[in-house]
Amino acid sequence: MERKEVENFKKWDWAINAVLVTAALLIMARMAWGLDTQDITVEWTEAGKKIAAERVANWKTKEEMVVVSAGEFIMGSDKKTDRLAYRGEMPQRRVYLDAFEIAKYEVTALEYLKFVLATNRSPQLDWRYDGGNFQETMAHHPIMHVSWYDADAYCKWAGKRLPTEAEWEKAARGVDGRLFPWGKEYAGPSRANFGRTGLSGPVRDRPERLMLYPPIISVDKYDNAVSPYGLYQTIGNVAEWVADWYDQNYYTTAPDRNPKGPETGTQKAFRGGGWMDSTTTMRVAMRNGTDPNTKINWMGFRCANSVGERPQASGERAEVLSALPLASYP
């Protein structure tokens, strides 16, 4: 074979190999995008279930609830004071809510384990150790890979319910229209777990990373970033399912007293940003929705409950609240 023919052959060989490699990568990408974690099931072993039962019996959970008193708060966003606000958060308005209770922390893996055992469910996607268990360090991480229906079922099993969008927002920001649980300073790594990439993210760009454990942390971290009612991590770590159906335009027609979202819909609302979200999402007024069957590693939840009628703020506190303009800050 002449030299020129050899060179041509090498070129064609390289081109063919390049095409084959590209085809393989495309197939892998297609498989990744088609990945559905709902089709993956982890099964208990007999020894694993025994370990799980011992954990439930002996390990302490973080199921503390706090009471949010009845009264008005400033809900939604005003473009004049929040340049990142978008249409679904407007108009900003005063909303009255009856008193309610809400969890201080997001539901953890340990708390969800109680529910899994009590209702004879399979282990979670992430529970791949010791016959269907999570690692000890994950016990107080927020539960994830739960659909809206899973979250709703857990809260009902626990004698509670999911919070409404309005309840979640009041508990997260207080009554004065602040942008963040702690006030008006933007979120940073010292106040919230967000903007994380590395080996586990971002999931939106690499869906195969759904199979990897994300960089989440225990639900009781960031003492300096709690809400006025003492809630931890209402933004960052994992986003949270709430009770309402989602409608981007709901605020334009929503009642100003105990709003509960549209009567029907195709998506369920969620609030708060997750570990892989950006700064624009790290705001308590930010809202979004997705298919209620979605199970993903940046979505969890916390529970709420109704309480008896309680008197509205009285005396000096009531006067201060009534005098607050929309979108004022401490």
Image: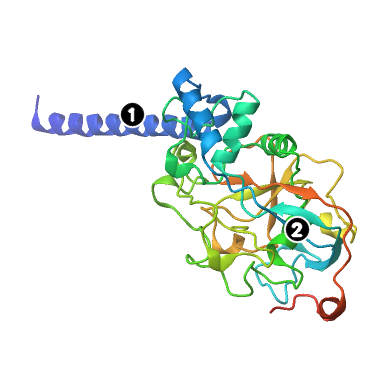
Res 329 quadrant in image: bottom right
Residue at image point 39% right, 34% down: 25
Q: Is residue 246 above or below residue 18?
A: below
Tell whether 6 sits left or right of 164.
left
- Render colour scheme: rainbow
Q: Is residue 229 above or below residue 127?
A: below
Q: Is residue 328 above or below residue 173?
A: below
Residue on which disc 2 sits: 67
Image quarter of the N terminus = top left
- Measuring from the top left, give residue 327's x and y in whole percent: 75, 75
Tell whether 258 sits left or right of 280.
right
Residue extending furthest toward the front: 58
Which label number is shown at residue 122?
A: none
Give the camera-side residue of 216 and 98. Answer: 98
- Measuring from the top left, give residue 270's x and y in whole percent: 69, 49
Residue extending furthest toward the left: 2
Residue at image point 46% right, 45% down: 214
Residue on which disc 1 sits: 20
